[in-house]
Image (cartoon, rainbow, N blue to C red):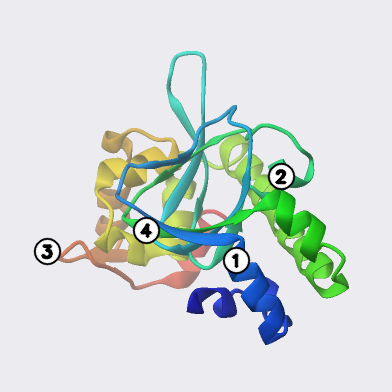
Amino acid sequence: MQSIREVQLFSQLSDQQLKELEKISVLKSFYADEILFYEGDEPEYLYILTEGLLRLYKTDNKSNEVYLHQFIPVTMVAEAACFEEMNFPATARFVTKGQVMKINYKKFKSEFLQNPEICVSLISSLTKKIRILSNVIHKEMILSSEAKVASFISEHHELFLTLKNNQIASILNVSPETLSRMLTKLQREKIISIDKKHQITIHDNDVLNALFS
């Protein structure tokens, strides 16, 4: 399982340790829109996203999806639920087809969590998740629709080639009409341009960044 060696978390393991890790791991492929886990599920595995885009969201009392984050490879997903022995606090669904490494958590805990280098890497991963949560709170409570769109273009403009506008609008928690209106406004002000293939070119980074900074 070559992809294990590409995961930063396991980069310091010996060949023998990697072989032992492979014995408790499996790679699983997913189609777009398939669910990796549901909010409320009990975790059994550590999940490492190795291919594709994975959307993390919660569902409100009106069955609306509230976007939390979108993971790109290679990254660990929802590891805190395993460490805290709690149910998953959100749902994870693939935006594109993808692949996940599933590691049996109970065996991983007993066989690998004694390794101090792995523990340090896990702490680093959890720290990144705290920053993600802080960023989500900031965007949802402070940023306007225009600022959300500008921020997404600045950070993920390449996704416009792979995602439809309604998918991007859902990620940003805005309506497709609002997204379209904001994109038209940014083009009219010559901050960006969008070609027929839906590829975005940024013409003025400073002005774009000022909209959400």
* Horizontal arrangement in the rendering, residue 155 relative to residue 202 (left or right): right
The percent coordinates of residue 137 (x first, y second) are 65, 40
Task: Tell me whether the residue at label 3 lies in contact with that at label 2, contact meaning CB atoms closer than 8 angstroms.
Answer: no
Earlier residue among tags 3 and 4: 4
Type of amino acid at the residue the image marks with label 2: Cys
Mark 4: give few (<14), some (14-19) or many (20+) Cα within 10 Å.
Answer: many
User: On residue 196, which mark appears?
Assistant: 3
Q: Secondary structure at mark 4?
A: strand
Q: Residue at x 67, y 81 (%)?
A: 11
Q: Secondary structure at mark 3?
A: loop
User: In this rendering, which labeled residue sits more in front, label 1 or label 3?
Assistant: 1
Alpha-carbon distance for marks 3 and 4? 26 Å
**Residue 22: image location, x then y, percent:** 58, 69
Real-space Cα separation, disc 1 to disc 2, in angstroms: 19 Å
- The quarter holding residue 156 reads bottom left
Query: Which-is-in-front pick, marks 1 and 2?
Result: 1
**Three-letter amino acid code at disc 3?**
Lys
Front disc: 3 or 2 = 2
Are there few (<14), some (14-19), or many (20+) residues within 10 Å of tag 1? few
**Which residue shows up at 35% across the image and 49% down it?**
95
Residue at the location (38% across, 38% down)?
A: 170
- Amino acid beneath label 4: Gly
Disc 1 from disc 4: Cα separation:
22 Å
Q: Secondary structure at mark 1?
A: helix
Provide the residue designation for mark 1: 23
Label 1 to label 3, Cα distance in Å?
A: 47 Å
Viewer-side label of 3, 4: 4
The local secondary structure at tag 2 comes to: helix
